Amino acid sequence: MDLAAGPGIMARPPRLATSRYKGRQCCFLTFCTYERQRLLVERETVDALREQLLRSSQANDVAVDAYVFMPDHVHLLATGLTEDADLTAFVSHFKRQAGWRFRRDVGRRLWQEGFHDRMLRDDSDRWPTVAYIVANPARAGFVTAAEEYEFWGSLIHSRDEILKTLAMHGAYTAPGLHF
């Protein structure tokens, strides 16, 4: 905790060099709701965020391999599709547009400042990261199996495709993934 940010307030996570977020990079991202409030529980809210995620990914040449909307945070795996793709621009676009619409419709702030990230070093990290994202609701105790949670998916694969691929990678099973 950074005490300069004030008691009980986390400072914005440090960023890698700007160039690390550009091009065909793959990054595991986490965004938290403001003060970790449980704002992502209504289908209408999550559907609107999913639509904005699609628009932001298209506008920034980014594929969203997997996502999960938890009550107070979002995990996603994002991959730049071109050499011009910029993951920080994608995050900024998504959070700004989604936050603006949420404030307009609900009258509250949606996002905490900043985001957490982990750059994937190579493709062998991709499916374990997808498994982590998909199994997150089961690990949190919201469901007993990933298939039961409605607020996860991908913008490039069907849920069935993800579950089948995870089953093929048996070493990547996680709590909540039952094959």
Image (cartoon, rainbow, N blue to C red):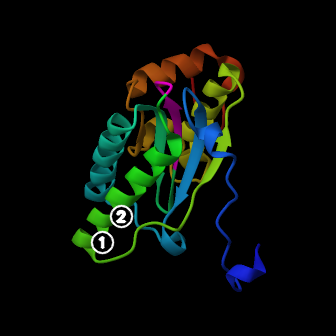
Residue 176 seen in the current view: no
- Could you give the CA–CA distance between mark 2 and mark 1, rounded to whole angstroms? 6 Å
Tell me the amino acid under the disc marked 1: Arg
Mark count: 2
Question: In the image shown, does 30 or 18 lie closer to the viewer?
Answer: 18
150 lies above or below 42: above
Left or right: where 95 falls relative to 121: left
Left or right: where 155 falls relative to 169: left
Classify the position of the N terminus by image quarter.
bottom right
Return the residue at label 2: 99
Evaluate if marks 2 and 1 touch, with contact meaning CB atoms under 8 Å apart. Answer: yes
> Which residue: 46% across, 24% down?
82
Q: Position of residue 50 (x, y in %)?
A: 33, 46
Question: In the image shown, does 164 or 96 lie closer to the viewer?
Answer: 96
Tell me the amino acid under the disc marked 2: Gly
Q: Position of residue 128 (x, y in %)?
A: 66, 29
> Which residue: 45% across, 54% down?
92
Q: Which residues are magenta?
A: 75-83
Residue 65 seen in the current view: yes
Residue at the extreme left of the image, as rendered: 105
> Which residue: 46% across, 66% down?
111
Question: In the image shown, does 138 or 89 lie closer to the viewer?
Answer: 89
Left or right: where 51 falls relative to 154: left
Is 59 in the magenta? no
Return the residue at label 1: 103
170 lies above or below 109: above
89 lies above or below 96: above
Residue at the extreme top of the image, as rendered: 168
> Which residue: 57% across, 51% down?
30
